């Protein structure tokens, strides 16, 4: 691979992107750094279709600017994020907005100093919001680079080096968008469409694309068994508190625990069973109702309960109720 072949690849890539790229995506047609930043965080762990159809526009209508997001309550931000999962993204967005004082930084280093922004997101915001000549690295791009350079077991340092080597510094915006698009649309994990790919003139792995990167063995996520008790007072109010810690931080939940269920649930009414798949474990829980005394801050009417930010597991419990 030399400068001439790379330049030829750039020409092929831009022609393909002009004809087939997803140029109409709203975060590609706006010059608003805030809107681009929101899209990048949403797209970290969520498919484009889901973000586009159910969350992106709704979130921007509710929090149309960085100051508006900073002024919102954590509960309101988490409520708007419900269903997207990986709720630390929302908590970090909120905290970052408060630290920015109305303006999103325009350098990679300053962006990386904000909570929830790693190297990948910082480069994406710099490239797309500020049109800087930096390479973007996400899952689709990693796969494209691994195949172009026939890397069976790529490491981050090596991938960033290859990304810098291929980067079109004259047209970085379209280049990076096109790299993501060919990874999503042509260079798929299964059944890649190599004859249509603009990288075929430089791709060292096109003879056996599914060998790059080498498939990783997947372990079944561990199973976590719990009991969950929904406490209800004489007024029909339900007790729920916001979580603390990294897992589902800020989302409201009911009383829960592991072990000793027989003694703990004695006298309770059995409501049913729930199962919820998380990224790093599977939850299976038996749910009970307990008549209890109490009132005040963390006791909510059924109508109030439905408006609280909750995870998918708690939503299933609400259905049992």
Image: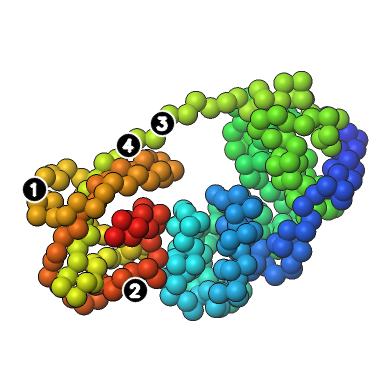
Could you tell whether 295 is left or right of 136 in the image?
left
Which quadrant holds the C terminus? Answer: bottom left
Residue that appears at 84% across and 37% down: 198
Q: Nearer the viewer, mark 1 or mark 4?
A: 1
Q: From the image, state whether disc 1 or disc 3 is nearer to you.
A: 1
The answer for how far apart the CA atoms under marks 2 and 1 are is: 31 Å
Q: Earlier in the sequence, mark 2 or mark 3?
A: 3
Q: Where is 197 relative to 109, above or below?
A: above
Q: Position of residue 55 (x, y in %)?
A: 57, 62
Q: Is residue 206 left or right of residue 265?
A: right
**Residue under pointer 1:** 263
**Residue at disc 2, secondary structure:** helix
**Horizontal side of residue 301 vs 280, given as left or right:** left
Question: Which of labels 4 and 2 is toward the front?
Answer: 2
User: Residue 223's mark?
Assistant: 4
The residue drawn where x is 70% and y is 62% is 27
Residue identifier under label 3: 220
Can the viewer see residue 10 in this picture? no
Q: Position of residue 280 (x, y in %)?
A: 40, 41
Tell me the distance, in whole angstroms, between the alpha carbons under discs 1 and 3: 31 Å
The residue to which callout 2 is attached is: 304
């Amino acid at each position: 691979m030399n400068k001439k072949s790379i330049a030829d690849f750039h020409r092929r890539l831009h022609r393909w992107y002009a004809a087939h790229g997803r140029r109409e995506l709203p975060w590609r047609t706006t010059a608003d750094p805030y809107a681009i930043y929101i899209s990048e965080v949403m797209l970290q762990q969520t498919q484009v279709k889901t973000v586009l159809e159910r969350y992106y526009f709704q979130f921007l209508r509710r929090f149309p600017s960085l100051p508006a997001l900073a002024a919102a309550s954590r509960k309101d931000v988490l409520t708007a994020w419900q269903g997207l999962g990986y709720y630390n993204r929302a908590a970090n967005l909120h905290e970052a907005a408060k630290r920015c004082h109305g303006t999103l930084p325009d350098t990679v280093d300053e962006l990386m100093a904000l909570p929830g922004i790693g190297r990948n997101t910082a480069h994406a915001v710099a490239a797309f919001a500020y049109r800087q000549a930096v390479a973007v690295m996400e899952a689709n791009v990693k796969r494209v680079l691994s195949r172009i350079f026939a890397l069976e077991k790529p490491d981050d340092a090596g991938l960033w080096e290859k990304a810098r080597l291929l980067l079109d510094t004259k047209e970085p915006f379209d280049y990076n968008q096109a790299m993501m698009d060919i990874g999503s649309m042509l260079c798929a994990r299964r059944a890649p469409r190599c004859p249509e790919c603009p990288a075929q003139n430089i791709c060292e792995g096109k003879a056996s694309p599914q060998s790059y990167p080498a498939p990783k063995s997947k372990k079944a996520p561990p199973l976590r068994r719990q009991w969950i008790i929904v406490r209800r007072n004489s007024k029909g109010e339900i007790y729920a508190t916001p979580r603390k810690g990294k897992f589902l931080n800020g989302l409201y939940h009911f009383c829960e625990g592991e072990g000793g269920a027989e003694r703990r649930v004695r006298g309770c009414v059995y409501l049913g069973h729930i199962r919820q798949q998380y990224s790093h474990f599977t939850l299976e829980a038996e749910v009970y109702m307990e008549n209890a005394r109490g009132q005040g801050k963390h006791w909510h009417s059924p109508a109030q309960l439905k408006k609280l930010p909750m995870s998918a597991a708690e939503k299933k419990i609400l259905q049992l109720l």
